[in-house]
Image (cartoon, rainbow, N blue to C red):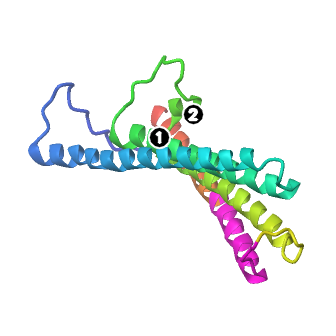
Amino acid sequence: MSMAPETPLPPPGTQLRPLPMLIFGSRWLQLPLYVGLIIAQIVYVVLFLKELWHLSSHAFSFTEQQVMLAVLGLIDVVMISNLLVMVIVGGYETFVSRLNLEGHPDEPEWLSHVNASVLKIKLAMAIIGISSIHLLRTFIEAGNLGGGGGRVTNYTETGVMWQTIIHTVFIISAIGIAYVERISSAAEQAAHKSAKH
C-alpha cells in the first residue's frame, strides 16, 4: 500500500503569499477574547473575596449547613477560575501563539503536551466538576425546603431532576469525547507505524 507523499514544509524564513498570510494572521483576532477572559478572571477573584468576607464575618452565626453551602460556593468560584485559566493559557498556546515557557519553573505540567484534543477533554472534565458542585448545592438546598433553616430556595422536584439529567449528559459527553480521541490517537499511531514499514 503506497502512502501519499507528505507536503514539503517551506524553508524557514520563507515569505507567505498575501492571502495565506492574512488567513494565518487572523488568529490574532482571538487575542481580545483571551484578554476579556482575563478580565472575567479578575471579576471572579473579586467575587471570591466578597464571598470569603461574607463567610468569615458570619462564621459564628451560620449553621453547619450554611457554612457548607458557602464553602461550596467558594469551591465553585475556584473551579470556574481554573476552567478560565485552562481556556486562556491552553487556547492561546494552541490557537494563537507559543508562550515559550519551556524550562520556566512555573510552567503548568499539562501545558507541555496540550493540543486541541487534550484541551477538549480537560475542559469537559472541568465542566463536570463544576456541574457536580452545583448539583451538590442543589441537593443540600432542596433538602432544606420546609426545614426552617431560614433560607429561601426556588427548587422544584422537576428542576432538580433536570439538573441531574443535564449533569448525566455532561458525563456521557465527556466519556464520548475521550473515547473518540482514544480511537483517533490509536488510528494515528497505526498510520505512523505503517508509514515506517
Real-space CA distance between mark 2 and mark 1, rounded to the nearest whole angstrom: 9 Å
Decide if residue 99 is on the left or right side of residue 16: right
Region in magenta: 152-175
Residue 165 is one of the magenta-drawn residues? yes
Tag of residue 110: 2
Q: Residue drawn at (25%, 33%), measured in percent from left and top?
A: 9
Residue 166 - label: none
Report crowding for label 1: few under 14, some 14 to 19, many 20 or more residues within 10 A (C-alpha).
many
Q: Are marks 2 and 1 in contact (CB under 8 Å)?
A: yes
Residue at the extreme right of the image, as rendered = 147
Look at the image and tell me whether residue 58 can be seen.
Answer: yes
Give the residue type at disc 2: Trp
Asked whether 168 falls inside the magenta stretch, the response is yes
Instruction: Say which residue label 1 marks.
Output: 90
Residue drawn at x 89%, y 73% is: 147
Answer with left or right where residue 32 lies relative to residue 107. left
- At which x and y percent is residue 30? 32, 49
Location of residue 71 in the rendering, given as x and y in whole percent from the top left corner = 75, 49
Residue closest to the eye, 141 or 33: 141
Q: Is residue 103 left or right of residue 20?
A: right
Quarter-of-image position of residue 133? bottom right
> What's the amino acid at mark 1?
Gly
